[in-house]
């Protein structure tokens, strides 16, 4: 009878250990895959990320938004001309050179609207160069290596059935949490690119405000926002690099559950810092 109970116990133990190891080996795959793809995703220009979406955004902007920007530019140009004329003691000190000044400012404003997409893409080309350079420096794999998994299996095989059941349940909960974290990483990275597309679709309107000193604050803030979006990718790369170092520093001791919850905590911290990258980038560039 004892032999039968021992055989059942060994079978249950083997099944639990196998289930735990299968869960552990696949638990970090989703997050690790997302983290590995971050460098290529945030380092891709809007035109290269999704050419179809970019072409659609550009066509809509040029056919719908540029005419509106032209109307705004016309109003600003007329307002600027009136301001230039009445600034000198209500025509008491009138000088004809102000018309050349007005023509030059209007010409520059028209050229900015005409080359809106070239300017906006230049901003992201600069950010892409910085991100790709950072990606070559920031290295390290976030995956748990085979040696660590082998050590964990030896520890599990030395445990009794009761503790193994508890570890199995906690590993299942951690697996669900890690999948949620990987989804959050996906949303943040792709949400940034969608925000870039939305910003570039309205680019002609803020660019049309550069013809007037007062209204040009709109265009200047828009440019700062573009730089913030571009360099947000650099901050995301820094977060991923910190995450990789923290994961590699985790030591899988006899307390496997504590080590796993430590990795879960680092992943939650990664998601939290990724959420903060947008706000931090805007504060650095003083964008509203």
Image: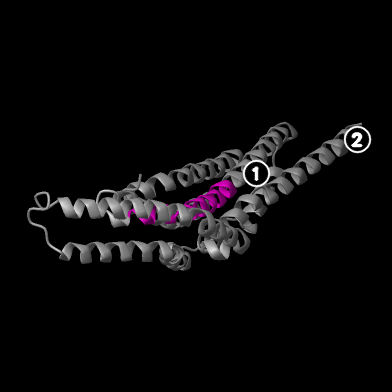
- 142 relative to 274, above or below: below
Q: Residue 121's spot in the image, x, y percent?
A: 45, 64
The kind of secondary structure element at disc 2 is: helix
The kind of secondary structure element at disc 1 is: helix
- 99 relative to 214, above or below: below
Q: Give the residue pinned by disc 2.
A: 4
Q: Quadrant of the C terminus?
A: top left
Say whether residue 199 is left or right of residue 151.
Answer: left
Quadrant housing residue 163: top right
Q: Residue at the location (72% across, 31% down)?
A: 162
Say whether residue 177 is left or right of residue 124.
Answer: right
Q: Is residue 254 visible?
A: no
Q: Residue at the location (72% across, 43% down)?
A: 20
- Part of the protein shown in magenta: 185-209
Q: Which mark is residue 248?
A: none
Which sits earlier in the primary sequence, circle 1 or circle 2?
2
Q: Which mark is residue 179?
A: 1
Magenta span: chief secondary structure: helix
């Amino acid at each position: 009878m004892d032999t039968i109970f021992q055989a059942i116990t060994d079978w249950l133990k083997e099944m639990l250990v196998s289930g735990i190891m299968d869960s552990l080996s696949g638990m970090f795959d989703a997050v690790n895959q997302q983290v590995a793809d971050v460098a290529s995703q945030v380092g891709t220009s809007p035109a290269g990320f999704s050419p179809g979406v970019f072409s659609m955004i550009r066509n809509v902007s040029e056919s719908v938004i540029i005419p509106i920007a032209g109307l705004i530019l016309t109003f600003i140009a007329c307002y600027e001309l009136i301001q230039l004329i009445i600034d000198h003691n209500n025509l008491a000190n009138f000088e004809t050179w102000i018309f050349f000044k007005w023509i030059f400012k209007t010409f520059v404003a028209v050229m900015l609207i005409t080359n809106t997409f070239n300017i906006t893409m230049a901003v992201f080309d600069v950010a892409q160069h910085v991100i790709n350079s950072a990606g070559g420096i920031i290295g390290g794999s976030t995956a748990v290596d085979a040696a660590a998994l082998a050590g964990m299996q030896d520890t599990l095989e030395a445990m009794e059935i009761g503790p193994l059941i508890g570890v199995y349940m906690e590993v299942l909960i951690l697996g669900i949490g890690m999948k949620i974290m990987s989804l959050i990483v996906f949303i943040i990275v792709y949400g940034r690119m969608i925000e870039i597309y939305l910003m570039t679709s309205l680019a002609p309107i803020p660019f049309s405000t550069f013809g007037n000193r007062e209204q040009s604050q709109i265009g200047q803030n828009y440019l700062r926002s573009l730089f913030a979006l571009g360099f947000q990718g650099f901050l995301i790369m820094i977060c991923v690099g910190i995450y990789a170092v923290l994961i590699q520093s985790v030591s899988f001791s006899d307390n496997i559950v504590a080590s796993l919850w430590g990795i879960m905590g680092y992943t939650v911290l990664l998601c939290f810092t990724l959420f903060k990258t947008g706000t931090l980038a805007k504060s650095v560039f003083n964008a509203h």
